[in-house]
Amino acid sequence: MRVVLAEDLFLLRDGLVRLLESYDFEVVAAVDTGPGLLRALLEHKPDVAVVDVRLPPTFTDEGLQAALQARRQVPGLPVLVLSQYVEQLYARELLADGSGGIGYLLKDRVFDPDQFVDSVRRVAAGGTAMDPDVVARLFAKETNQSGAMSRLTPREREVLALMAEGRSNAAIAQRLVITERAVIKHTSNLFAKLDLPPSNDDNRRVLAVLAYLR
């Protein structure tokens, strides 16, 4: 699996390269600036991009903006964003794109190699990998607003939050201490409430997360 990595701190960038390669990823480019990231993404068209939000030259949101610009030219390009903090605006901007695999993790998650690598693979496969802290912040903000959230029960919101983290039905059932059949029932109900009919072309789990978090 081919990866483009963007991280301005040399030690962390080098550590991520070594980590990914130890799990049989091929890091085709490791860059440290926003412009360098955009060039690498358009040149290599990787299976997944792992991107720090803040890159030189201004250390604001160059990494995110380069990734979004690349996705406009390479639709569906999977992007996993890394951030030091929960930055809701950046998370929403990434989610608003609505195509291809997406992820938003806090950098602390990198210290759990298995969890980090699982997130990279999930995003590369077209799924979502949202940091639990990011999901909690986004969901908390929406709880007091009208719309989709007002139609979901507390249990359905719990299921959707775990779906946003990229968890399977079995993992959701284990976390909530319910049966997989109950999880399937809750997901079917929330799909209906979010107006997501069955489709052979779309991943409704991803669409449900996007529809809500947008």
Image: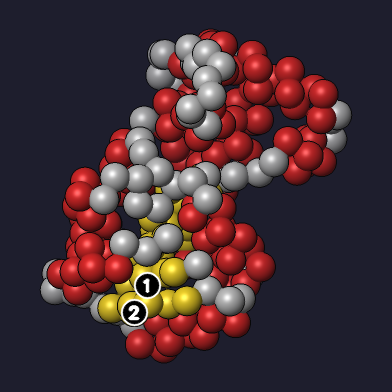
* Disc 1: CA contacts within 10 A as few (<14), some (14-19) or many (>=20): many
Where residue 179 appears, as percent x and y from the top left, is: 85, 29
Quarter containing the C terminus: top left
Nearest to the observer: residue 207 or residue 112: 207
Nearest to the observer: residue 168 or residue 72: 72
- The residue tagged 1 is 5
Does the image show residue 104? no
Residue at the spot x=44%, y=21% of the render?
A: 144
Colour style of the rendered protein structure: secondary structure
Q: Earlier in the sequence, mark 2 or mark 1?
A: 1
Secondary structure category for the residue under label 2: strand
- The residue tagged 2 is 30
* Disc 2: CA contacts within 10 A as few (<14), some (14-19) or many (>=20): many
**In the rendered view, would you say 142 is above or below 3?**
above
* Callouts 2 and 1 close, C-beta under 8 Å: yes
Residue at the spot x=33%, y=72% of the render?
A: 6
**In the rendered view, would you say 152 is above or below 56?**
above
Q: Amino acid at mark 2?
A: Ala
Residue at the spot x=21%, y=46% of the render?
A: 72
Residue at the spot x=37%, y=64% of the render?
A: 46
User: Number of numbered discs present?
Assistant: 2
Where residue 76 appears, as percent x and y from the top left, is: 35, 45
Q: Quadrant of residue 45?
A: bottom left
Secondary structure category for the residue under label 1: strand
Nearest to the observer: residue 146 or residue 73: 73
Does the image show residue 17? yes
In this rendering, would 103 be left or right of 32? right
Q: Quadrant of residue 141?
A: top left
Q: What is the CA distance from the residue labelled 2 to the residue labelled 1?
A: 5 Å
In this rendering, would 59 be left or right of 80? left
**In the rendered view, would you say 6 is above or below 151?**
below
Nearest to the observer: residue 82 or residue 188: 188
